[in-house]
Amino acid sequence: MTKKNIRQRRAAASFSFRASGAGKGGNKTAKVKGAKIRAAAGQVVAAAALPQWTTVKIAEAFRRLAAADPAPRSELKHADPFTLLVAVVLSAQATDAGVNKVTPNLFKRADTPQKIAALGEARLAELIKTIGLYRTKAKNLIALSQRLIAEHGGKVPRDRAALEALPGVGRKTANVVLNVAFGEPTIAVDTHIFRVANRTGLAGGRTPFEVEMKLMQVVPERYRLHAHHWLILHGRYVCLARRPRCEKCLIADLCKWPGKTTLSASVDATPEAVGSAQ
Ligand code: SF4
């Protein structure tokens, strides 16, 4: 074991000890400092070399996630590939809930590339101004709509390179569109999947791309189409950033995160914690 790994394991062990209330100050320490400590421990563990999952255990994790939610769906409101693309572009560094507050009204006025382009940047910005980075997103959506009209007959292309060539569209957005609109078995690594994959040891990686490549290797083919949604929803509602709900977790016995046992025994998730992670 390297010196770095030893330091990381000591930090994780220290976290477990303190969060359990066994340290100086007992439960008070866990309550006051718990969230910060857990967040720090999550980072430490994310970088550590956790034990590898066996293929049998990976299949079992996805079997359980699939049994609990056989047909997971995107939480972004949309009606077709174009409105999905718009919603996903708007969701960058924003919550799905925030985007869903804006899109019904937007799509009532403009739900095609032609109509979005006709709105113009200022009017579009006004319609989406409650979403972060709305000016940049308005500019990108106008340019994206014009490109779709000029180069793709007003249709969203079912092609990664063509999607990623559109303004405001990166690999993650392309993966979501390919998966949700076209049924391709892609895995879009957002903040939730990145955290869950690293924390649990399922697919460690320093970047979203590394995690995506690892997941594509280890997720059994029959689960790949929905893996993206199962992992996002697991991260959004159970494996929360600051206060993972290990005591409610379907895959707690399979997860490699050292802090899970302590949390299962001593920490209850609060509604506030659930909300803060969305
Ligand atoms: S036990 Fe579940 S909720 Fe807890 S860290 Fe592991 S995957 Fe996340």
Image (cartoon, helix red, strand yellow):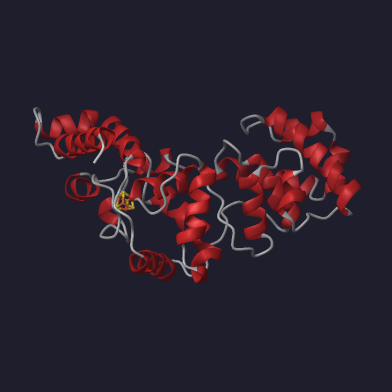
Image quarter for residue 275? top left
Q: Classify the position of the N terminus by image quarter.
A: top left
Where is residue 152 drawn, in percent x and y?
86, 53
Task: List the single residue furthest toward the front.
Answer: 2
Where is residue 241 drawn, in percent x and y?
38, 40
Residue visible at 68% across and 60% down? 181
Residue visible at 71% across and 34% down? 137
Q: Which of 108 and 168 is in front in this view?
A: 168
User: 142 above or below 159?
Assistant: above
Left or right placement of residue 130 versus residue 52 in this view = right
Q: Which of 136 and 212 is in front in this view?
A: 212
Residue visible at 17% across and 45% down? 266
Residue visible at 41% across and 65% down? 62
In this orientation, does residue 223 appear?
yes
Left or right placement of residue 226 versus residue 243 in this view = right
Where is residue 81 drawn, in percent x and y?
73, 56
In this orientation, does residue 77 appear?
no
Q: Which of 165 and 177 is in front in this view?
A: 165
User: 198 above or below 122?
Assistant: below
